Image (spheres, grey):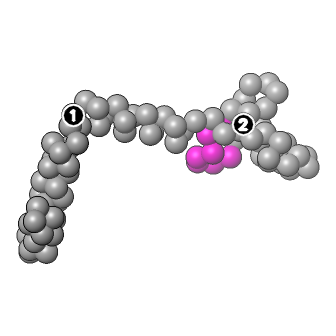
Amino acid sequence: MKEREEQRLFDLDGNARERLVLWIRRRMDEYGITVDALAEALDADEAAARAVRYRDAYGNTWDGFGEKPDWLARAIYAGQDIDHFRC
């Protein structure tokens, strides 16, 4: 029955963001999730997503986001396989 009420909220016209926030708050209450715990989990996810993915013997690193660093581009141009640097 609770799910029908929630589905009705999603089906109604109006501000989708407010309905989504309400739904999230209810799930947080239902599972005992605090705002601090949620913030910690989001920070941990971000840190894991930005973990070092490539490293060379000189300690140069790259997380795989953005433009390829010069040290890695030079190594690939010289014929080295990028998987050689994968952590």
Q: Looking at this view, is 55 or 25 the one in front?
A: 25
Give the residue displayed 29% in from the left and 37% down from the top.
Answer: 38
16 or 10: nearer the viewer: 10
What residue do we see at 52% from left, 37% from top? 48
Quarter of the image where one finds residue 74: top right
| Residue type (three-letter) at the residue carrying disc 2 | Cys
Left/right of residue 10 with respect to residue 38 in the rendered view: left
- Determine if residue 6 is in view: no
For residue 11, what is the image quadrant? bottom left
Q: Quadrant of the N terminus?
A: bottom left
Q: Which residue is mark 2?
A: 87
Residue at 74 percent of width and 41 percent of height: 86
Asked whether, in this view, residue 52 is left or right of residue 40, the answer is right
Give how far across and how far down residue 21 sits, in percent: 16, 53
Which stretch appears magenta?
A: 62-68
Residue 63 in magenta? yes
Residue 30 image point, x, y percent: 17, 45
Q: Which residue type does callout 1 highlight?
A: Thr
